[in-house]
Amino acid sequence: MEPIVEAPRLVPLAGPPLVLGGADRPVVLQFVLALWRSLWKRQGILPAGGVRAIAATRELVAVDPVRVEAYRAVCGHAPGSAVPAAFPEILFHPLLVEIALAPAFPFSPLGLVHLGQRIRQVRPLEAGERLDLRCTLAEVRGTGRGYEVDCAMAADAAGGVAWEGVATLLSRARAGPRRWTPRTAPEGVDPGQSLEVEVPADTGRRYAAVSGDWNPHHVSALAARLLGFKAPIAQGMWTLGRVLAAAETLQPIGPACTVEATFQRPVLLPGRIALRLAGRTGGGVRFEVRDPASGASHLAGEVVPAG
């Protein structure tokens, strides 16, 4: 029997937006603030006062060539001059943290789950560029499993927006279902287009060193067990970066594209994953990341060239 899915309920945002600076906080201070906020905020429960619109901005953020090369290495990208399509999301990490830690953010920052990622690359970025970044709490939706939060990101360069994206997070209600709805394999996948990849135990630490995402369940076995995981888990954006690197070898994406990805089960470290790829009619690539032993889906989505 299919589960009953409750239609999302849009939560109005009160404005004008509270604008934050997006400061880089030391990792230890981030965790202290997250713990403090969790003392008086709850997961999956809307505060009585409603939700305030929030934005965080930073200007002239450099696309560091050394950081780009480190990202290429950890995600398995081939050498190239253009910045990988998912890389700019890590530039927004301090802004996303600042929004989640703001007193006006409606939910506890601890336990937020990354459900999905959308990317629109207007043009490839080049290492060394400087970008003006803006991240906003764009939408909140009530669902049967809690509240979904969309954080919209835009990177402006000379001439306008060069890259934009949306990260969808879940603040899960205690009574909500904890398992994801199973997905089918990407349409048209040929089993011969499947690549199995070893995921080393230090993947979480290596990706954290590039991205700044030092959430303890990615880098510590003890913390992962305390948070309910059997072992540390890879960052979802690493998994997306790794499958996009593989997709580049199947079919060139072109200078402008969109990416849609839905995160399913986490990848335990160390582990092994199967990357399943298929060309789309009209161009682009459908992809899925599965556990090669159980067949469970970790991630599914597609890359579509613009135009």
Image (spheres, rainbow, N blue to C red):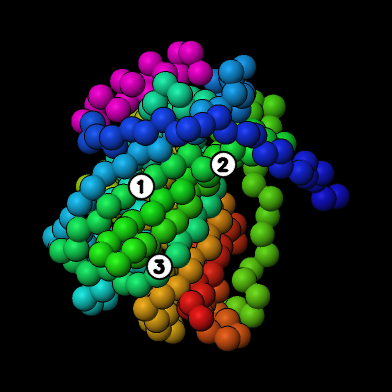
Cα separation, mark 2 vs mark 3, equals 21 Å
Q: Quadrant of residue 47?
A: top right
**Residue matched to label 2:** 139
- Which dot, 3 or 1, sits closer to the camera? 1
Q: Secondary structure at mark 2?
A: strand
Q: Quadrant of residue 96?
A: top left
Q: Residue 165's x, y, as percent?
A: 44, 56
Q: Which mark is residue 134?
A: 1
- Inspect this view and state whether residue 273 appears: no
Q: Residue 93's x, y, as percent?
A: 33, 44
Segment tinted magenta in the rendering:
26-41
248 relative to 228, above or below: below
**In this picture, residue 130 sits left or right of residue 256:** left
| Residue depicted at x 48% and y 32% | 16
39 relative to 276, above or below: above
What predominant SS class does the magenta segment belong to? helix
**Residue matched to label 3:** 121
Q: Secondary structure at mark 1?
A: strand
Whether label 2 touches label 3, CB < 8 Å:
no
What's the residue type where badge 1 is placed?
Arg
Q: Secondary structure at mark 3?
A: strand
Whether label 3 touches label 1, CB < 8 Å:
no
Q: Residue 162's x, y, as percent?
A: 34, 65
- Inspect this view and state whether residue 34 appears: yes
Q: Between residue 209 and residue 256, name the one nearer to us.
A: 256
* Crowd around label 3: few <14 · some 14–19 · many ≥20 (10 Å): many
* Crowd around label 2: few <14 · some 14–19 · many ≥20 (10 Å): some
| Residue depicted at x 68% and y 32% | 176
What's the residue type where badge 3 is placed?
Gln
What's the residue type where badge 2 is placed?
Glu
